[in-house]
Image: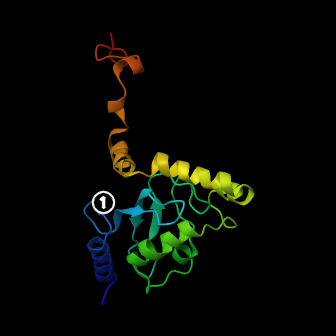
Amino acid sequence: MSSPSKRREMDVMKLMMSDYNVETINDGLNEFNVKFHGPKESLYEGGVWKIRVELPDAYPFKSPSIGFVNKIFHPNVDELSGSVCLDVINQSWSPMFDLLNIFEVFLPQLLLYPNPSDPLNGDAASLMMKDRKQYDQKVKEYCERYAKKEDITKSTADNETDDDDDITDEETGSSDDEIAGHADP
């Protein structure tokens, strides 16, 4: 590998040729979304998430930025931003790792073995430590509400249309006859 850009291309192509659905952003290889399924025999089994990946110019020498686009209830994932707290990505990244490692090893391990002692989501961590049964139920509830195949396609559409199509004129109390603001006299 003579340059980081060739390595980036190779890693993204490897990911695209695997079982992962990869959707590039702005026709480049620096930003893309990956469809990720929850690991089998875990609380997250059956869930489908859109993971946003941003590769820095110095990739693979600098780690990628990874975040969940649709919601997930997990101690090591920030509920609002979707940011992931994972040592192997944030602190001990090595150029020996590639994108397939993230989706085949690192993220499944994160979901299988949450670490409530180093949380990004304090509520999830606290609930996990105090009431594991209720925590498990909330994880499953989030999977049902936010992590279905239609949710990851809807989350893209929501960003583009803000769900305006779902609201009728009667619900908003307006119609096409009304004009916003007032005309100058």
Task: Name, please, the residue furthest toward the right.
Answer: 130
What type is the residue that disc 1 sits on? Ile
- What is the number of callouts on the image? 1
The residue nearer to you, when weighing 180 against 175, is: 175
Q: Quadrant of the C terminus?
A: top left
Looking at the image, residue 106 sits to the left or right of residue 15; the answer is right
Q: Is 165 located above or below residue 128 in the figure?
A: above
Q: Quadrant of the N terminus?
A: bottom left
Q: Position of residue 171 (x, y in %)?
A: 41, 20
Q: For mark 1, what is the residue?
A: 25
Q: Is 80 located above or below residue 59 in the figure?
A: above
The residue nearer to you, when weighing 46 against 175, is: 46
Q: Position of residue 63 (x, y in %)?
A: 46, 75
Q: Residue at x 39, y 71 (%)?
A: 55
Q: Is 178 located above or below residue 79 in the figure?
A: above
Q: Is residue 95 visible?
A: yes
The residue nearer to you, when weighing 78 against 150, is: 150
Instruction: Specify the quadrant of the image occupied by residue 2.
Output: bottom left
Q: How is the image coloured?
A: rainbow
Looking at the image, residue 12 sits to the left or right of residue 142; the answer is left
Element under label 1? Answer: loop
Q: Residues within 10 Å of mark 1 (few under 14, many from 20)?
A: some
Looking at the image, residue 179 sits to the left or right of residue 60; the answer is left
Task: Name, please, the residue furthest toward the front.
Answer: 41
Q: Residue at x 32, y 31 (%)?
A: 165
Q: Is residue 123 visible?
A: no
Q: Residue at x 40, y 63 (%)?
A: 36
Q: Position of residue 44 (x, y in %)?
A: 51, 60
Q: Residue at x 57, y 77 (%)?
A: 91
